[in-house]
Amino acid sequence: MKKYLPLLLLLIFFRTSAQTGDSLLTKVLTPTEMQTDFKYLRRLLEETHPGLYRYTSKMQMQAKMDSIYQLIQQHMGFYDFYRTIEGFIADIRCAHTHSLPFKNWVSYYSNRMKTLPFFFFPIQNRSYVLFNGTYDQRIQPGFELISINGKSMESIRKDIYRYHWDDGFIESSKSVALQGQLFGLFYYTCIDRPDTFQLAFRDLQGDTVHLTTPAQTFVNHQKAYIKNPVNKQMLKWYNTKRPKKPWRLSFIKDLSTAYLRFDSFSGEGAKTGEEARERFRRFMDVSMAKIQQKKTHYLIVDVRSNYGGWDTQGVELFTYLMKSDSAVRYYQRLHSITDSSEFFKYSDLSSDDLKNIKKELQSEKDGTFTLKENENPDLQLQSPKPNRFRGKVYILIDGRSFSTTTEFTAVAHSNKVGTFVGEETGGAYEGGNGSSFIHLELPNSKIQVGTPLVYYQNAVHQPKQKGRGTLPDYTVPITLESLLQHKDVQLEFVKELIKKGNN
């Protein structure tokens, strides 16, 4: 299974509890405490992380770790130390490796951390108000945030990008850190924690509007989102619950087009990879029968904002779309760097998994361990389904397409399954790191760290640029106008392509 971090909170309302005050603001760590934590983190990474040197040589990475150890020689406030750890984690360039300041960060953030009372949506390196969490009606959805406390948003954006964890050299996924609660979290933990914000906005006519507002907990943001009338329309459009079914088929009648939407590859409650595969097959078989019955010529596959899930479901989707009659590989190789570690006790590996590790891994001369093909159907040749879709396929992607989703998009792109529309995906084309994960807290600071155990090598053509995502055939960015009018410009672009294809 390829798990993912569900940190993107577009659905902004959730339960909160009555707690106030961030006790970490006054927490100070001694050099011994920090050095102990960092040595512990370094041992975890060097012993178990398969992609630690994927984008940075071993010599360079070890020099970086030595340098950090030398820097933490004096007492340091908690958030200063956390920023040091966060920057180091970001330098690994692995989107499945992360650090968070504490357990249950959503609840802590909502009730204890006083942050900027706005929900922003990033568009092409600019930040726009989606919800106003104050009671000042001058600041409306669509206003652009220009500066915070005299610091330009361009500068703030670069600072936050420095600390966000991403695969390789992908920038499209970094914008996630500028959206909603994540922007508040990254600004608070990595930049500043002021009591008051001096803000400058650019309104829809291009004029500058200034606002001074106190920092507030997200509990108070929520109250203002509901009560401030400027948010009414945006709440109606964007504060909606996700559909109960993560996979949905519909038809665009006048275009002879089927539309398959995949919110995730989470398996609808499946507990094993094979169970997830079977559930997905049932859905796809029913969908293919309906598509064939309607004699549909075009298929739109929408995997935007799909953060991943079960690897098996990405593999299965590919076999329903293959153009080749011959079997092909989906993964070239999956490997780990250890078959035993005391850190495994902090992993999501089941007791059966732990017993079977050595059976499922093949030792290599270079010291790595390859997952055996006969133990993993996903590593075997993948044959096209007899009932696969044979018409023209369009695949919608963006920077929030990640993990299992980006493995699917990369392999589908390399095998020329269809036409890709949208924005660069958030996972590396060649493959990332994932499968199973270790989650633990550093002993003194209690900073939460998550790391993967398996290195993924997709069976794709060598890309022109290492460490980039799947690039669309047609780049179609979201616009401010489309956000404010609730229009899906990427889907509409595909519809226009289909109309032209019909002529």
Image (cartoon, rainbow, N blue to C red):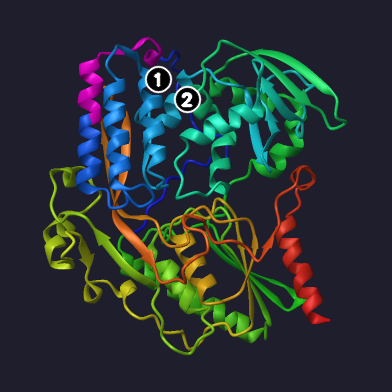
Residue 190 badge? 2
Instruction: Give whichever of discs 1 and 2 has the lower sequence position.
Output: 1
Q: Position of residue 427 (x, y in %)?
A: 48, 55
- Of residue 479 and residue 31, the one placed in the foreground of this image is 31
Q: Which residue is mark 1?
A: 79
Pick the quarter of the image with the N terminus. Answer: bottom left
Pick the quarter of the image with the C terminus. Answer: bottom right
Tell me how many marks there are: 2
Q: Position of residue 40 (x, y in %)?
A: 20, 32
Q: Quadrant of residue 27?
A: top left
Residue 406 badge? none
Task: For label 1, count other residues whose C-alpha is less than 10 Å away and answer few (under 14), some (14-19) or many (20+).
Answer: many
Direction from residue 10 to residue 55 in the image, left or right: left
327 above or below 62? Answer: below
Which residue is pictured at 41% across the width and 30% down the height? 105
- Of residue 344 and residue 35, the one placed in the foreground of this image is 35
- Write the start and end of the magenta stretch as one range: 23-38
Which residue is pictured at 75% across the width and 24% down the height? 201
Residue 30 colored in magenta in the image: yes
415 above or below 390? Answer: above
Q: Is residue 475 visible?
A: yes
- Type of amino acid at the residue the image marks with label 2: Cys
Which residue is pictured at 31% across the width and 41% down the height? 61
Disc 1/disc 2 C-alpha distance (Å)? 7 Å
Which residue is pictured at 23% across the width and 27% down the height? 37
Direction from residue 206 to residue 468 in the image, left or right: left
9 above or below 286? Answer: above
Q: Report the magenta stretch's main SS.
A: helix
- Type of amino acid at the residue the image marks with label 1: Tyr
Direction from residue 426 to residue 31 in the image, left or right: left
